[in-house]
Image (tube, helix red, strand yellow):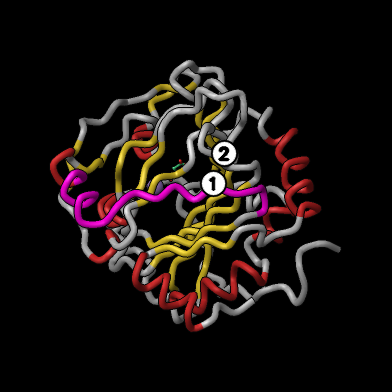
Amino acid sequence: MKLTKEQMEVYDEQGMLFIPECLCQREVEKMNAALLPLVKEDTPGRVLENNKKTVRALHGCHTTSEIFQRLILHPSLLEPAKQILASEVYVYQFKVNFKAAFEGDLWPWHQDFVFWDKEDGMLWPRALNIVVFLDEVNEFNGPLYFIPGSHKQSYTHLQTPPQQTTSNGEKNEWMDSFVANLKYTIDKPTITKLVNNHHIVAPKGPSGSVLFFHCNLVHGSVSNISPYDRKVAIITYNSLENIPHFNSEPRPEFLVSRDYTPLQPLARDFEK
Ligand code: SIN
Ligand code: MN
């Protein structure tokens, strides 16, 4: 699937593009079925909410599950990713954010690129997020909030000290990028100014909807007090001309992939 000239213009101007009902229900059902056993496994890439029970996120399952391996090659995702990044691409990061009914916690306002710049040594904001809705996203279950047009610069970030979150008794500093108290967030005056100049949008739609967003687009989400799960897969494609230098010890492979094979879309959808 190629994006039209008009869709490319929307992406360039707003830093985001929403395509409701882009993937079919059968594809969504297969992904949700694959997650049922995966979520039960106590793997290093599994992050829990602060209550230490509810799963907040699963990282790197595109390498452990066939259906997610096929998702990253889906022509409706990979072709636009190559078009937007104007180069060959690879998967930099892959995660499923669960935002579970009643329990799913918030994500403070932030830009993604600052994490990849400071933690991994990524050179340029030439990476793209694609959010695939695995549940319906509605006004109640903590939809992602975006400030359209905020992707054109990097803002100064408040830096919270490392939380040294423990999981199974181990210290995992990489979790500071994935728990509700994020390491780099944007201050209230900056958000107020941005929202006054632009506005906030919260794309909503059925499962299978797809949202492309720039890695410098300011975003966040509130907690989910509704009885509806809000599960999304987020694929981050990076340009092969933008491989990070990793000045220090690289973060774990399930967070930051070092497989730089240029990806080619599957000929048809990922249904066999
Ligand atoms: C993110 O910022 O990576 C995720 C936000 C969300 O899932 O609401
Ligand atoms: Mn983010």
68 in magenta: no
The residue identified by callout 1 is: 95
Residue 194 on image: x %, y %: 21, 52
What element does badge 1 sit on? strand
Residue at the spot x=45%, y=45% of the render? 252
Residue 106 on image: x %, y %: 40, 31
* Segment tinted magenta in the rendering: 191-208
Q: Is mark 1 within 8 Å of ligand 1?
A: yes
| Within-10-Å neighbours for mark 1: few <14, some 14–19, many 20+ | many
Q: How many marks?
A: 2
Residue at the spot x=25%, y=41% of the render? 184
* Closer-to-camera residue (125/197): 197
* Quadrant in which the C terminus is drawn: bottom right
Judged left or right of residue 43, residue 119 is left
Residue at the spot x=76%, y=67% of the render? 269
Mark yes or no: residue 120 visible. Answer: no
CA gap, disc 1 and disc 2: 5 Å
Residue 226 on image: x %, y %: 55, 24
The residue identified by callout 2 is: 58
Q: Amino acid at mark 1?
A: Lys
Residue at the spot x=47%, y=64% of the render? 17
Q: Are marks 1 and 2 in contact (CB under 8 Å)?
A: yes
Residue 174 on image: x %, y %: 37, 38
- Mark linked to residue 269: none
Quarter where residue 216 is shown: bottom left
User: Residue most toward the right?
Assistant: 272
* Closer-to-camera residue (138/233): 138
Q: Amino acid at mark 2?
A: Leu
Q: Quadrant of ligand 1?
A: top left
What element does badge 2 sit on? strand
Quarter where residue 96 is shown: top right
